[in-house]
Image (spheres, grey):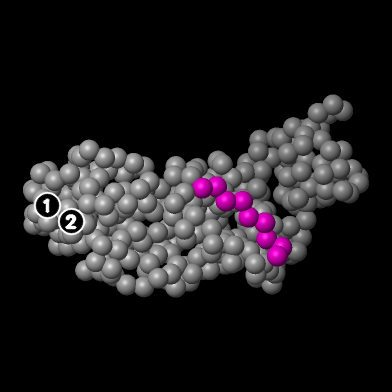
Amino acid sequence: MSGMYRWEGLDEFLAVAEHGSFYRAAEHLRVSPSHVSRQVARLEDRLQARLFYRTTRRVSLTEAGQVFLARCQRLVEERDEAFLAISDLQSAPAGLLRMSTAVAYGERFIVPLVNDFMAQHARLKVEIELTNRNVDLVHEGYDLAIRLGRLSDSSLVATRIAPRTMYLCAAPSYLERYGRPHTLSELARHNCLLGTSDTWMFQLDGREYPFRPSGNWRCNSGYAVLDAALRGFGLCQLPDYYVLGPFRRGELVPLLDANRPPNTAVWAVSPQRRHPLPKVRLLVEALKGGLARCPEYSEVVG
């Protein structure tokens, strides 16, 4: 059987199976009902199997049709994705791209870089949701999400776009009054500035060491935690992009460097696709390059 003829009738078969009618399948494909009927009949002849039960009121799949449908859907989907991948390589990013990112990080870093990308691709439309919850990319219809820290969902395609090191630190004024902790066991004696997490992660003897901080101050904003730390209210644990500047200026002091938690990262995650969407791939590349140029990532303190 010639390879060319193997494809004939598949689209018509799938349309009839989906719509339960030769007439509605023809409307969907914008061809005549006789064309659909003829193509399905030829397909049945080649397969030597009946795919549909036909009555004057109803069309339904035979057992052979049900088995063939399951295989055909995947086959045609892969064929269409292959054509799409080639055509997309030759075209600029276009259409709608829906993405999600954490509020503070998104406002400071991601949105300006997305805007730079938009300025270069006029046919692209972007919807950005700033939220600190982990959206369900597949069920909520997102093409891309920027996530901070460690990933738990292995079903997503993840690209590391920037480092993310967590630092324990305090202002010199606080350390002058209360002393500098030299071991993890001493943290319980200090006032800790709480953010969104109830647990601070460290490493001890090559293993993760969780610590539950306590103190007289809490706010679910990293910038608010930073401000309180700069005022000498207590110890805090914040990501690099908050504290590298204050470290360089001597406004904060990094603590317990040997116990710093293993580096996490900033991730771009997207749903699994056999052929990744070029607009997503190109935006991820732009974000990775843009973050590398940010002054907050230009120096590592250790």
Determine contact: label 1, label 2, CB under 8 Å. yes
Local crowd at mark 1 within 10 Å, few (<14), some, or many (≥20)? few
| Number of the label disc, if any, that sits on residue 177 | 1
Closer to the camera, 283 or 157? 283
Give left or right: position of 256 versus 63: left
Measure how far apart labels 1 and 2 are at the Cα level.
7 Å
Q: Secondary structure at mark 2?
A: helix
| Number of the label disc, if any, that sits on residue 266 | none
Position in image of residue 76 (x %, y %): 67, 53
Asked if one can make out residue 264 in the rendered structure from this viewpoint, the answer is no
Closer to the camera, 281 or 124? 124
Closer to the camera, 232 or 115? 232
Quadrant in the rendering for residue 84: bottom right
Q: Quadrant of the N terminus?
A: bottom right
Position in image of residue 284 (x %, y %): 52, 64
Residue at left offset 26%, top offset 62%: 251
Position in image of residue 280 (x %, y %): 57, 61
Q: Main secondary structure of the magenta part?
A: strand
Local crowd at mark 2 within 10 Å, few (<14), some, or many (≥20)? some
Q: Looking at the image, is 223 positioned above or below residue 293?
A: above
Bounds of the magenta segment: 122-130
* Residue that carries the numbered disc 2 in the rendered image: 173
Residue type highlighted by circle 1:
Arg
Quadrant in the rendering for residue 86: bottom right
Give left or right: position of 259 versus 125: left
